[in-house]
């Protein structure tokens, strides 16, 4: 449990697109955040009694989880990699929440025509005869990456503001920075090196390892968070299909459906009898398919006699136990 109080605490980004997407995800997963006063830094999730929500900057969230002042956090994988430390106190319990995608890259001026790879950059440093100056918000990740290419002698200039102007005004030769669309790079006449991707990042759910190991209530909250988030993420790209099928028995209809590519189900289709006025034998078929497969699934249902097809969204798909929860338990025992 968080070291500074008896509360179980979840830290969320305080502002910006990451904050907005996080609140949307939690709401869609049935874990809406109740925050009646935007000026306050505390909120609650009514569906998880005993959990307090705090709002912090993404980088501060990692530090708070690392130090144990909060139990859980949602932030970017980039700042987790940079600030989690070497002691294993930060455990990523869901690495891919599906938003906030970006990459951390080595970026140089477009005017460096002959520098398009890390090997070219090594050659340039040898040619200049001095360490290259790199402006970065991620000195730990940058230095580890450059050392992989034998570039131990690099000067890192840590900055928190806009990095794109650093090569232009001369306080750095190149930068490492996060890239999502690449528009800002083009506007500032910068380019990524072909093999200069340091890491790929998106929003993730992290937890304090010691809290999970020592506090059953924290472990219980972890399971609830994972249950609902995973079930929602699994469901959101799928749709539920209902169709009426004429046939003498469920086995006869299932045999026809098994001959199709999309409508056989995992173990098999769900079929239940329809009570008809005239005594004719009809069965209701229910299956879940990926949205991208919907058109083909409807076509296949029609081919085997399906009619009255109804399609609806799926809110959750719960498994016996989320794989992410099992992975978390394994990590706690290592």
Image: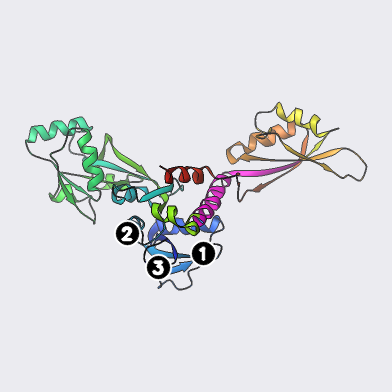
* Circle 1 Cα neighbour tier, 10 Å, few/some/many (<14 / 14–19 / ≥20): some
Using the rendered image of the protein, determine whether residue 256 is visible from the camera's viewpoint.
yes
Task: Determine whether, in the image, residue 63 is placed left or right of residue 151.
Answer: right
Q: Marks 3 and 1, Cα distance to the nearest angstrom? A: 18 Å
Tell me whether the residue at label 2 lies in contact with that at label 1, contact meaning CB atoms closer than 8 angstroms.
no
Quadrant for the C terminus, please: top left
> Is 267 situated left or right of 173 in this image?
right
In which quadrant will I find the N terminus? bottom left
Query: Does the segment drawn in magenta span residue 21?
Result: no
Viewer-proximal residue, 194 or 27?
Answer: 27
Q: What secondary structure is found at the residue carrying circle 3?
A: loop
Q: Residue at left 60%, top 49%? A: 316
- The total of numbered circles placed on residues is 3
Residue under pointer 1: 45
Q: Nearer the viewer, residue 166 or 27?
A: 27
* Magenta-drawn stretch contains 223: yes
> Which residues, given as a range, are shown in magenta?
220-243
The residue wearing badge 2 is 60
Residue at the disc numbered 3:
5
Q: Main secondary structure of the magenta part?
A: helix
């Amino acid at each position: 449990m968080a070291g500074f109080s008896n509360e179980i605490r979840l830290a969320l980004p305080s502002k910006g697109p990451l904050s907005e997407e996080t609140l949307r995800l939690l709401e869609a997963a049935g874990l809406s955040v109740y925050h009646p006063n935007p000026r306050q830094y505390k909120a609650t999730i009514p569906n998880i009694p005993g959990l307090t929500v705090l709002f912090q900057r993404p980088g501060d969230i990692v530090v708070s989880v690392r130090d144990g002042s909060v139990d859980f956090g949602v932030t970017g994988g980039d700042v987790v990699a940079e600030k989690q430390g070497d002691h294993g106190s930060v455990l990523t319990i869901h690495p891919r929440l599906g938003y906030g995608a970006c990459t951390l890259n080595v970026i140089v001026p477009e005017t460096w025509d002959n520098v398009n790879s890390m090997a070219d950059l090594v050659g340039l440093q040898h040619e200049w005869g001095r360490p290259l100056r790199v402006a970065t918000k991620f000195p730990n990740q940058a230095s580890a990456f450059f050392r992989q290419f034998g570039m131990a002698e690099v000067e890192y200039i840590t900055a928190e503001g806009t990095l794109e102007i650093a090569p232009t005004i001369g306080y750095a030769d190149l930068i490492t920075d996060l890239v999502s669309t690449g528009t800002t790079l083009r506007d500032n006449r910068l380019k990524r090196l072909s093999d200069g991707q340091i890491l790929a990042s998106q929003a993730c759910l992290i937890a304090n390892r010691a809290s999970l190991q020592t506090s059953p209530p924290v472990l219980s909250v972890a399971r609830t968070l994972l249950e609902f988030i995973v079930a929602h993420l699994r469901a959101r790209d799928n749709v539920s299909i209902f169709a009426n099928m004429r046939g003498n028995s469920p086995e006869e209809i299932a045999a026809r459906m098994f001959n199709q590519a999309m409508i056989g189900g995992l173990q098999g289709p769900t079929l239940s009898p329809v009570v008809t006025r005239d005594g004719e034998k009809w069965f209701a078929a229910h299956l879940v398919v990926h949205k991208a497969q919907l058109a083909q699934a409807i076509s296949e249902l029609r081919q085997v006699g399906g009619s009255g097809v109804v399609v609806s969204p799926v809110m959750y798909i719960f498994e016996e136990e989320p794989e992410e929860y099992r992975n978390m338990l394994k990590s706690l025992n290592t």
